[in-house]
Amino acid sequence: MFTAMTVIATIVFITLGRYSGSLGGVAHASIAKPQTSLVRGGNNEINMDKGNVGEYRFYVSNKDGAEISEVSMTYSIDVVTNAGYKGKVKYSLFHCDENGVYDEANDGVSLNQNGSIVKATDDQMLLPATTETAHHYILKLYPDTAGDFGFNVKVTSVQKD
């Protein structure tokens, strides 16, 4: 009888044993910073008359100051004539190199638009993450009447999924 009690006591001891542990750590979350900038090139004033073609050069970059975008961005370009001009203006937007050289047959983004360009985009309008990139453009303006007019160029960028 003595032997049977020892076995029972041993089984009870093993059954009551319990072990637990935990693991901890530190996590840090940060939000990637998007950067898009529209940089003017050339003069603020474009002198032209009826029949002349004005040109305005600019570029879109994923760098603002010293900060390069940490996320990829797609973008579109809008061009709108300010109120007050009595005539009509047609716009054409082209990709170009940093010297303004372009191929009219192959580099057109939006051609012969009356009074405005709305959400012009193509497959080249992607700014990659972490690699400094600039896309150069030349905007051609074709007024039909002599006179002063202004225009606005707007870039809208969206984080690429």
Image (cartoon, rainbow, N blue to C red):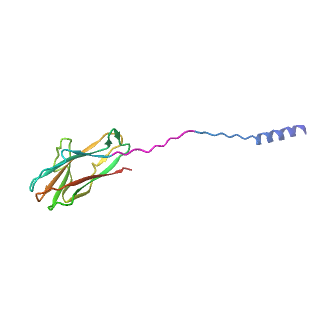
Based on the picture, tell me whether residue 27 belongs to the magenta stretch.
Answer: yes
Q: Position of residue 155 (x, y in %)?
A: 29, 51
**Which of 159/15 is in front?**
159
Q: How many marks?
A: 0
Q: Position of residue 67 (x, y in %)?
A: 35, 40
Quadrant of residue 6 in the image? top right
Based on the picture, tell me whether residue 109 belongs to the magenta stretch.
Answer: no
Q: Is residue 31 left or right of residue 41?
A: right
Question: What span is colored magenta in the figure?
Answer: 25-35
Q: Main secondary structure of the magenta part?
A: loop
Q: Quadrant of the N terminus?
A: top right
Q: Position of residue 131 (x, y in %)?
A: 33, 39
Residue 25 visible? The answer is: yes
Q: Is residue 100 left or right of residue 119?
A: left
Q: Is residue 83 left or right of residue 61?
A: left
* Extreme residue toward the bottom, this view: 86
* Extreme residue toward the left, this view: 51
Q: Is residue 77 left or right of residue 88?
A: right
Q: Position of residue 100 (x, y in %)?
A: 17, 44
**Which of 103/31 is in front?**
31
Q: 56 above or below 23?
A: below
Which residue is depicted at the point 35% across and 46% down? Answer: 72
